[in-house]
Amino acid sequence: MTVNSSAFNGNIVAQTVNNNNKSFQQSDSHYPDATVPSDSSTSTPKLISAPNVNFGSHKLNSATSLIGSWDGDFKVSGEKGQEIKINVSLAQNFKYANGKDTGVTWQLVKSDYSSGTLETSSQDISTTPASITYNDDGTGDLIASWNHNRENKQYIFYDIQISKLNSVTEAGDYTATLKWELADSP
């Protein structure tokens, strides 16, 4: 039996590969690095698209509060089973033509069937961000997931509600801006 010893300069994986495949060994005892697959089992979630919320057209003083309809895509990239937290807040409220705030308030409404019966709660987003928790089902499509949960009366789904509509005194087309951002993300 012959045992050889050689000086090593380089990657341990490369030495193993090169010792097993002598044709790769260099004459100066330097071993090139071998490509080794990395374990990237967790990915950083990303916000791909955020939806608009449509409250439709209404006559003045016809309602004091409305639930909006999701309009567009609300998608994130992550991994199946990954919990993703998204903060939403009001960046700019409805304003009159003169720039004055209308006084409308905004809430994130959480509906939850997890206990077998519907439980709802709301968080005011007019001045403070509220948090949405999404357990990625592998699609990254929050609205499709919420619509499925709503239709099947299961798990959690979210809506945006506006209130104090009786404070609006002028007819017009109003636009507000919501701010969506991932919580605890780089």
Image (spheres, rainbow, N blue to C red):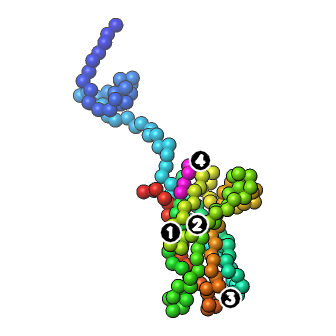
Q: Amino acid at mark 4?
A: Gly
Which of the two discs, 1 and 4, sits closer to the camera? 1
Whether residue 34 can be seen here: yes
46 lies left or right of 5? right
Which of the two discs, 3 and 2, sits closer to the camera? 2
How much space separates mark 3 and mark 2, taking CA atoms? 25 Å
Near mark 2 (Cα within 10 A), the count class, few <14, some 14-19 or many ≥20, is: some
Above or below, 121 against 165 in this view is above
First reached walking from the N terminus: tag 2 or tag 4? 4
First reached walking from the N terminus: tag 3 or tag 2? 3
Q: Amino acid at mark 1?
A: Thr
Compare residues 1 and 140 and report the one nearer the observer: 140
The percent position of residue 57, horizontal first and vertical second, equals 69, 83
In the rendered structure, which segment of residues is drawn in magenta? 79-85
At a point 75% along the width and 60% down the height, the residue shown is 151
Whether residue 146 can be seen here: no
What residue does disc 2 label? 123
Q: Amino acid at mark 3?
A: Leu
What residue does disc 4 label? 81
Above or below, 12 against 132 in this view is above
Compare residues 7 and 48 and report the one nearer the observer: 48
What residue does disc 3 label? 60
At a point 50% along the width and 88% down the height, the residue shown is 99
Near mark 4 (Cα within 10 A), the count class, few <14, some 14-19 or many ≥20, is: few
The percent position of residue 29, horizontal first and vertical second, equals 26, 27
Near mark 3 (Cα within 10 A), the count class, few <14, some 14-19 or many ≥20, is: some
Q: Could you tell me which quadrant the N terminus lies in?
A: top left
What residue does disc 1 label? 128
Q: Do the numbered discs 2 and 1 sit on residues whose CB atoms are within 8 Å?
A: yes
First reached walking from the N terminus: tag 3 or tag 4? 3
How much space separates mark 1 and mark 4, taking CA atoms? 28 Å
